[in-house]
């Protein structure tokens, strides 16, 4: 993994967006894996600004990481709604190119298989954007998820529901189940780009980056990927033992490898 530590959360968003924009400029038909939650919001806002400044995103496609089960797509906290309002509309993407798992399907297993097929038909994900949960989850792959898992229904951990309750009027309104891309699905993306901000994520980040490769920390799967970048603010990086080394390597990155 390449670990990038920046002073502020805003700089994390700008740097991650710069990396994505660099790829889109070279590959206009880039397929993005779209995370939700608060971590990637600055990325999407910065990409929207770059689009206003001339970045051509007209042929970009997107696949959301996950969706709640049983939540109507009209609900403001459904990820179909969140992706539409934070990604599709601000970036001016073609809605037909932006896909979200079906959490309302009568046959969830068939819907999950269809989502996997749609990703394959699109040529696979080029850049998978990721956040990280306080318990180390990525997507909604909770601790002990299989590293070979595919898109499927999952039961949300109590900690995840509590963390997400801030988006709802009460904890009782947070769904107990979701559909999520599996860790095996995520690993097939050509690049992984994880962002984290704030001290509340510091333990999870340290476990994922420097801890053992273990299913109890699903984000540790990034250690197995051929091209994974982790961009952090100082607070999220505060528990890393090798932080000074990561800063040194980033500062001395060869010009031909730079994307910022």
Image (cartoon, helix red, strand yellow):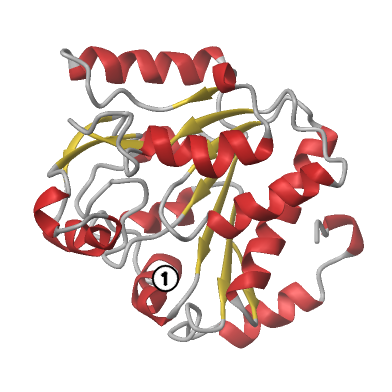
Q: Position of residue 220 (x, y in %)?
A: 38, 58
Residue 191 against residue 46 in the figure, above or below: above
Left or right: residue 41 versus residue 139 is: right
Is residue 22 at least partly visible in the picture?
no
Q: Is residue 41 above or below residue 163?
A: above
Element type at mark 1: helix
Q: Residues within 10 Å of mark 1 (few under 14, many from 20)?
A: many
- Residue 142 at x, y percent in the picture: 23, 51
Q: Quadrant of residue 46?
A: bottom right
Is residue 23 toward the left or the right of residue 233 in the image?
Answer: right
Q: Which residue is mark 1?
A: 205
Q: Which residue is at 38% across, 56% downward?
A: 219
Which residue is nearer to you in this view: 78 or 136? 78
Question: Residue extending furthest right?
Answer: 255
- Report the side of 61 relative to 137 (left or right): right
127 or 149: which is nearer to us?
A: 127
Q: Is residue 115 above or below residue 90?
A: above
Q: Quadrant of the C terminus?
A: bottom right
**Residue 195 coordinates in the image, percent (x, y):** 53, 61
Asked whether residue 103 is in view, the answer is: yes
The number of numbered discs placed on residues in the rendered structure image is 1
Q: Position of residue 139 (x, y in %)?
A: 36, 46
- Quick one: quadrant of the N terminus? bottom right
Image position of 117 with respect to 242: above or below: above
Residue occupying image coordinates x 20% and y 18%: 109
């Amino acid at each position: 993994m390449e670990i990038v530590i920046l002073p502020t959360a805003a700089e994390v968003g700008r740097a991650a967006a710069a990396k994505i924009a660099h790829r889109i400029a070279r590959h206009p038909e880039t397929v993005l894996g779209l995370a939700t939650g608060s971590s990637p919001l600055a990325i999407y806002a910065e990409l929207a600004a770059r689009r206003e400044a001339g970045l051509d995103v007209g042929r970009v496609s997107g696949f959301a990481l996950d969706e709640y089960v049983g939540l109507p797509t009209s609900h403001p906290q459904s990820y179909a709604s969140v992706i539409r309002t934070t990604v599709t509309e601000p970036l001016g993407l073609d809605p037909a190119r932006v896909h979200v798992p079906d959490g309302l399907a009568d046959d969830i297993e068939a819907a999950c298989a269809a989502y996997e097929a749609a990703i394959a038909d699109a040529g696979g994900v080029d850049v998978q954007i990721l956040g990280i949960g306080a318990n180390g989850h990525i997507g909604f792959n909770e601790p002990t998820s299989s590293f070979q898992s595919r898109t499927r229904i999952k039961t949300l951990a109590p900690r995840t529901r509590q963390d997400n309750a801030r988006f709802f009027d009460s904890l009782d309104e947070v769904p107990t189940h979701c559909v999520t891309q599996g860790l095996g699905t995520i690993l097939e993306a050509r690049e992984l780009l994880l962002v984290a901000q704030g001290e509340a994520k510091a333990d999870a980040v340290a476990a994922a980056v420097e801890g053992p490769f273990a299913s109890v920390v699903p984000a540790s799967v990034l250690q197995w990927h051929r091209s994974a970048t982790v961009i952090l603010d100082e607070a999220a990086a505060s528990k890393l033992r090798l932080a000074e080394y990561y800063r040194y390597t980033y500062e001395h990155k060869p010009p031909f490898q730079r994307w910022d």
